Amino acid sequence: MPRGGKKSHKGRGKQFSNPEEIDRQMRAQKEMEENEGAERGSSSESEEESSSDDEPKRKGVEGLIEIENPNRVSQKSKKVVEIDVNAPKELSRREREEIEKQKAKERYMKLHLEGKTEQARADLARLAIIKKQREDTARKREELRKEKEAEEAKSKH
């Protein structure tokens, strides 16, 4: 037995509920719900007459103490007539930043394609160097091929 007098439950057999037991419990729960629904239906008519307040039922100590929370924002439902569809929608900070980021990226890509950015200039310079190197190697290959043909023609004569 471990110190502290607490027993370990590791390695013990697990207990499983059999399906009949689960079905019986579910049926009993449904019957309870149906009975409560029938009772509520008959008592709701009398409750409607007695409660004329629009305030929801308060939980716990709320009903006893009147406290106004200045941070609480109550959800006021707007009428369809009051809603202005044509008014510009206010964007959240994240949405605004996302849109600004996209616009900046589009501006950069436009400038990049025109060759006005530093990166575009570097890319174009690198491409020019590569193009020149390829032209030089192609020219050298052509000269070597012509020399070989000339040597072969001399050796055959």
Image: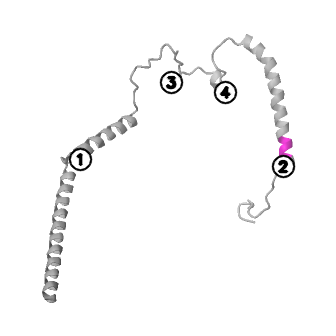
Q: Secondary structure at mark 2?
A: helix
Disc 1 marks which residue?
Answer: 113
Q: CA distance from mark 3 to mark 4?
A: 21 Å
Kindly identify the residue that appears in the image at 15 percent across and 70 percent down.
Answer: 139
Residue 68 on the magenta segment: no
Labels 4 and 1: the sequence-earlier one: 4
Disc on res. 99: none
Which residue carries the number 3 mark?
73
- Mark found first going from the N terminus, 2 or 4: 2
Q: Is residue 144 above or below residue 124?
A: below
Start-end of magenta stretch: 21-25
The residue where tag 4 is placed is: 60
N-terminal-most mark, 2 or 3: 2
Where disc 3 sits, the SS reads loop
Residue 69: percent from the left, percent from the top?
A: 52, 24
In the picture of the structure, the residue carrying the numbered disc 2 is: 19
Few, some or many C-alpha atoms within 10 Å of disc 2 (few <14, some 14-19, many ≥20)?
Answer: few
The image quadrant where one finds the C terminus is bottom left
Query: Which of labels 3 and 4 is toward the front?
Result: 3
Q: Quadrant of residue 146?
A: bottom left
Quadrant position of residue 25: top right
Looking at the picture, which amino acid does disc 3 mark?
Answer: Val
Image quarter of the N terminus: bottom right
Q: Give the x, y percent position of residue 52.
A: 68, 11
Q: Secondary structure at mark 1?
A: helix
Give whichever of discs 2 and 1 has the lower sequence position. 2
Residue 143 in the figure: left or right of residue 41:
left
Mark 2 vs mark 3: in front: 2
Instruction: Name above or below for residue 10 compared with residue 149.
Output: above
3 vs 1, front mark: 1
